[in-house]
Amino acid sequence: MSISRKKALEDVLERTPRHAPRPENKISAYYGENVFNLTMMKQYLTDEACDSIEDAMENHTSISRDIADQVASAMKEWAITRGATHYTHWFQPLTGATAEKHDSFITPTSDGRVIEKFDGSLLVQQEPDASSFPNGGIRNTFEARGYTLWDPTSPAFVWENTLCIPTIFISYTGFALDNKMPMLKALASIDDSATAVCQYFDKNITKVVATLGWEQEYFLVDKALHAARPDLQMTGRALFGAAPAKGQQLDDHYFGSIPARATAFMKEFEMESHKLGIPVTTRHNEVAPNQFECAPVFEEANLANDHNLLLMEVMEQVARRHNFQLLLHEKPYPGLNGSGKHNNWSLGTNTGVNLLKPGNNPKTNLRFLTFFVNTLAALHKHADIVRAAIASVGNDHRLGANEAPPAIISAFIGSQLSDLLDALETSIKAGKLTPEDKTALKLEIGRIPEVMLDNTDRNRTSPFAFTGNKFELRAVGSTANCAVSMTVLNTIVSDQLKTFKRAVDQRIAGGDKKDDAILKELQKLIAQSKSIRFEGNGYSEDWVKEAKQRGLSNLRNTPEALNVLNRKEVQDLFESMGVLSKEELGARVEVDLENYILKRQIEYRVLLDMSRSTILPAAIRFQSGLLTNVEQLTAVLGKDASKFSVAQMDMIKSAGTVIQNLHMAAAKMEEVHDNAEGAKTAIIKARDYAEKVVPCMETVSSHCAELELMVDDAQWPLPKFAELLFTR
Ligand code: ADP
Ligand code: MG
């Protein structure tokens, strides 16, 4: 039995708020102190070892066994000074979260003591007992071995007395079993293709890295109130609840002053994050009450993603110290704003240039246009894969509802850049460019910096928005591992850049001048990808209709979206880009479908159980109280009782109606669920859950919410939304 609502509310009132520890020093004094970064390496390692690591980080060269031994030993020495007793290979299995198995450093000696030891073989490779991680049937039992392998491009760190070593996770046969490995491959691919295209503009560009700046949204709820809601505890979201009288309609929470208890929590997790080298810098309230956001300074995508995963863990731990439960779910409260994780993405070069930032002369602007237009073209061509990348059970509730982008993928670029692309589309004529054409084009392209200066108009309803010097993928869910969307975005843009390079080279071989060839090719792409550009209100019903006319997909739920990955052309794309083989991709679809089904199954069970064993009994008790009252009135007043029991009789009847409705709806849900469970394949089962079970669950939820509004508040067993949202 979960704790009662009354007890939970008393607990909250009795809390003494925890204050954030006051840092003794400025941030720069403790920033990164728990990270074995290059500065630390230089203190602990020989120059030769440092060079080897730096080379591995930059050029992905391999590290010799001897150097690995040196690094391991240095890491251990350093980690012990930071309080570490254990080490772990930290990896990202397909479940979406991170995983770790801790081992201590100790090795017994012959004279009964122990010494701390850690060598290169333990650093480089481990074999966790991983047979219970989802693998989509890739590993059959006789080769059920999975290995974690050190990723030297992301530095090791100490968290909670454990040295954590970021690793990839692969099977014995080399199959990727995690989210990091494919992302690293996609990043390598875009490095190749973007660098090749950069050669048209600047021979000094020899490396391109994808950058990622995530924005993490979340809710906080007092831990006692959380403990009194089994649905929040077991599914991460409230499965039902009546809308509070005051929700987010006043918009008074957004950017408002942050409640003191939340501020103390934020200060503490920011301090822990800074010690871990996570450059969090922004904190603010979000749209809904008790909803907040934090964002870091952007970093290279692999590191940024490790930092996001680590941050989610840190936040969860620190929240508990403050008697909060962190809710990362995409939609913790039906009817209110959901939580996303905007992925700000761009491409940076070894020469310090942001390729999505317009320059100040026609040459750099042509480079900007090249990457900008190719990104739009990639999104246009592969919108369905992007949709699949953001699909999750939680995001299904968020997309297209209460201030979240719809499931239709489109891009917002602002009116001025739209005008510019429109002008370019028509101003380049077929055949050779005349001198007049070129002057006109130079004028158009020369206008870009001006355009950018007042490109302040923002469209918050777009799932993919250009925001001046980066694209912002806003459709990602708050629990997601960004590696999934980053793998897709970088793969599709890389593919597009390769196609572009081939086409431009062909035009040059056919006699075009380089700039003419680039412009003509861009013009073609602008025309082809036009339908993906949408500047209007993405939340409106009109857009759903217009998108349909434009031929854009609207894949409304996860099973539909995941099915995209079974298409032959999608498998070919991932395979040809060297990111995922057909089998690896297929395994991911299987794991994701299974995950979807399991989560829906849990939600279904919790809802059925709460309806029958908590809500119906509470409503019936309430009704019994009314009936007793009517009986007593009759006993005392006789015939006259009917005059004084009109309200009671009305309440008895309306409660009676909803009680029957809930009972019937629960039975119907059970029947539909049982049918779904009998489905022959995972895809059919997942679809049945999405299309048949979920609507039944919504009916059940709505009856529960109706009863919440009828039953005596003093008798209602569960914390209400107003209490969950406004208790600070
Ligand atoms: P908003 O909420 O208005 O979208 P924020 O300032 O909260 O803006 O977030 C902007 C995010 O974009 C930050 O995480 C920032 O680091 C990131 N960002 C800025 N420039 C780049 C870039 N070149 N590449 C990737 N991310 C970037
Ligand atoms: Mg943003």
Image: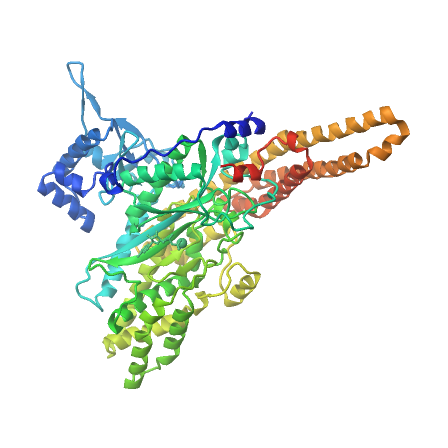
Q: In this view, does 472 lie above or below 68?
A: below
Q: In this view, does 41 lie to the left or right of 515?
A: left
- Percent across and percent down for residue 381 are 40, 63
Farthest residue in the top direction? 111
Farthest residue in the left direction? 47
- Percent across and percent down for residue 682 are 50, 43
The quarter holding residue 662 reads: top right
Q: In this orientation, which residue lies closer to the viewer: 287 or 490?
A: 287
- Percent across and percent down for residue 471 are 37, 59
The quarter holding residue 715 reads: top right
Farthest residue in the right direction? 639
Q: Residue at x 57, y 48 (%)?
A: 691
Q: In this view, does 64 lie to the left or right of 136?
A: left
The quarter holding residue 101 reads: top left
Q: Is residue 119 visible from the viewing direction of this image?
A: no
Q: Is residue 198 above or below residue 276?
A: below
**Where is ligand 1, by quadrant?**
bottom left
Q: Is residue 42 left or right of residue 586?
A: left
Q: In this orientation, which residue lies closer to the viewer: 291 or 706?
A: 291
Q: Is residue 22 left or right of residue 216?
A: left
Can you say which quadrant of the picture contains the N terminus? top right
Q: Is residue 245 visible from the viewing direction of this image?
A: yes
Q: In this orientation, which residue lies closer to the viewer: 232 or 647?
A: 647
